[in-house]
Each structure stands twice: as structure tokens, then as C-alpha cells.
Image (cartoon, rainbow, N blue to C red):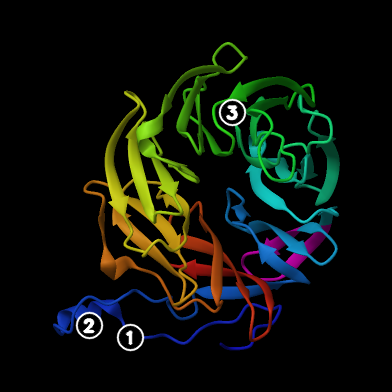
Amino acid sequence: MKSLDFRARWLAVLLCAGLLMASGVGVAEARPHPDAEGVTRLPASQYAVAPLVSADGTRAYVASIDEVGTSLDVVNTRTGRITAHVATSNGRWAGPLLFGAGGKQIYLLTDGTLNVFDTATNTLRASFPVPDQPRPEGSNPGSLSRAAISPDGASIYLSQTGPDNGTQSTGPSRLLVFSTVRQAFTTTVPLPGESPRAVVARPNGKDIYVSGDVGLIHLDVSTGTPTLLRTLSDTGFVDELALTPDGRRLYALSKPDGQAVLVDLDSDRVLTTIDFQSNYQPVLSPAVSRDGSRFYVLEDDHRSVPKVLSYKTATNTRVARETVSGFDMERGTGLTLGPDGETMYITGVNYVDDPGAFLQIVNF
């Protein structure tokens, strides 16, 4: 492991996959190209989640955890320099980030709170604690998990686990609705199961899906109040979700099993299962390319180097020559595809050499 610093730096080129294939040696993994990737250290951070990237690709926003709480870093993607470091909470959990309509705001989750970040001034503009949920005396509120924003930017949907007494759940999980116009939580509805995870909103503005321990939950939000339509239990326990660009299909990732199921959202039917052959080791951050031709996941089994696996969506088969590896981080924690369709933004951590959290930008 090579030492990293705050400034962007470039890696040496490794063997070209195409040359290996042409020589008959076999299929090789693709490596980052020279002069096409930078590594930025996130100040004092110990862990970082998948970044959010501006529409023009010039800024990456990274939520991370440090010794005193959580923070949001703004990174200039052309220079690799951090232009703002903003404390967001004194808790020990940072959730995913969402752009508001027009990219003028970022909504980020911290412990029990929805925060609003102003992208013009790089300041935390407001924080909204989630309303308490019905729970037995002495029990703890459930934890926020993920969120999604409606296509018109008017509503944010947040998933929250059920309350617990420290050892087991003592009530149902729920979905909360936050109005970006009224700047307030307006609705809460119970969800099946105890542990809801990711939330996605279809482009039609009528349907949202929530993953979790009971499977994939389908809700109708066309009336303003989410209504449960059905639960797809044959998906098994699913976590992170990735929509295809047309909003017609959904990849639902099962981290514990190292698998993903592809769901047809017009019929709510499981089409196929993809086995990443990760030996039940973590796969995370599913993403679909802008043209819909590729499906990517970040694989990190904590025994070998992290890598990004590529699958052809037409056949849902792996394209081994498009595997990206050779990152300058011991562990990968998040993957985001850039708006140009040719750039990956990877967050990760080092534990041994130069410990801390980092953002690496890769052209592929």
C-alpha cells in the first residue's frame, strides 16, 4: 500500500487487458488508466459512504464519519482538492445523500435527522429531527436507513426500522414523507417487517419500492399518502437497489448472499438472479450505466483487493475484461457512476498504511 496525501496523484499503468486477450494468455481484469485517476484524502475521516456527484461532474460530495461525528466534504474533481469541510452532526452514522430539485440542495441523513445542505454556499442550512414513533416506554426509536426523492423533488421518502428495547424489535417499521415545499414531515405509514433498507422512486412519480428483511415492498404514492400494494417475498432479504434508466426494471442486492435479483416493475415479477460468486462476502453499491447497457457492483471480500464487477444487462452475464481494480485503498466502501458515463467515484479506507478514508476518481 502506497502512502496517500491530500492532493490528487496518479497511478502507474498496469498490463493492458486487451493485449493479454490478444496474446491468448486469457481474460484479464481492467486496470485504471494512467493520468486518469486521482486520490483525495478526507480530513480526519475514518469511514465514507458513496459520494454524490454534481450534474456537470466538477464536484463530489462525500459524507463521512470521524472521531467527533459526521461531516460533508466538497471535492473539486478536477484538482482533487477539498473546497469545503462541513460538520453535520455529533453522531456516529452518516447515510446516503440526495440532490434536491435543480441540485441547489443536498439532503443527507444522520442519526434521527434529515439535514439540508446548500450547494451554493456550502453550508448546512437546516436540520429536521424525525418525529417520534409509537413505542413502549423505555424502548429506543428505530434507526433511519435510506431515502429517495420524488421525480418532481416535492417529497422525500425515508425508511426507519421499528423501535427496539436493546435486544429485539418492539414495534413495526415505517416510511416517513418529508415535504420539501413545507419543510416538514407530513406523513408516516407502517411497513411490513422490522428492517427496511433502501428506497427508490420510479420516474412515473406513482410508485416507490423499499427493500428489507421481508423482501421488496411496493407502495403507491400517487395520492400523496403511501399505500401498500404488495410485498415481493421471493426476492428474499434485499438491501441496496438500482433502477434502470427507463425505470422499468430494478436490481435488488442481497449483501449477505452475494447475489442480486432483477425485478420487472411493470409486473412486479422476479426475472432472474445474478450470483456474483463472492463466497458470501460483501458486494455493495449497485449501479446501472446511463445507457442501461451495464450493471456494476463494488465487491470487497476483505481478503483480496476491492474491485468493480461489470455485467451486460442484455444477458445479465459478467464481462470479466471490464472488471476495474488496482485501487489505492485497502477496502472499498462505496461506488457512484459519474454523469459522463465514463467515470467512477470510489470511496474507501486504509487501516494499515496511512489510515483514514479516501475518494478515488477512476476513468474507465
Q: Residue at x 67, y 33 (%)?
A: 162
User: Quadrant of the image for the C terminus?
Assistant: bottom left
Q: Is residue 206 left or right of residue 262?
A: right
First in sequence: mark 1 or mark 2? 1
Q: Are marks 1 and 2 in contact (CB under 8 Å)?
A: yes
Q: Are marks 1 and 3 in contact (CB under 8 Å)?
A: no
Disc 1: which residue: 15
Residue 14: percent from left, percent from top: 38, 86
Secondary structure beneath label 3: loop
Q: Is residue 250 visible?
A: no
Depth check: give the residue in front, 68 or 31.
Answer: 68
Secondary structure beneath label 2: helix
Residue 267: percent from left, percent from top: 31, 23
Distance in Å between CA atoms under marks 1 and 3: 44 Å
Depth check: give the residue in front, 302 or 363.
Answer: 302
Q: Residue at x 45, y 69 (%)?
A: 301
Tell me which amino acid carries mark 3: Ser
Residue 222: percent from left, percent from top: 54, 14
Q: Quadrant of residue 73?
A: bottom right
First in sequence: mark 2 or mark 3? 2
Distance in Å between CA atoms under marks 2 and 3: 46 Å
Q: Which mark is residue 196?
A: none
Q: How many marks?
A: 3
Height in image: 123 above or below 178? Answer: below
Disc 2: which residue: 20
- Asked if the magenta segment contains residue 32, the reply would be no
Q: Which residues are magenta?
A: 72-86
Distance in Å between CA atoms under marks 1 and 2: 8 Å
Q: Which mark is residue 150?
A: 3
Q: Is residue 51 left or right of residue 66?
A: left
Q: Is residue 97 left or right of residue 271?
A: right
Q: Are marks 2 and 3 in contact (CB under 8 Å)?
A: no
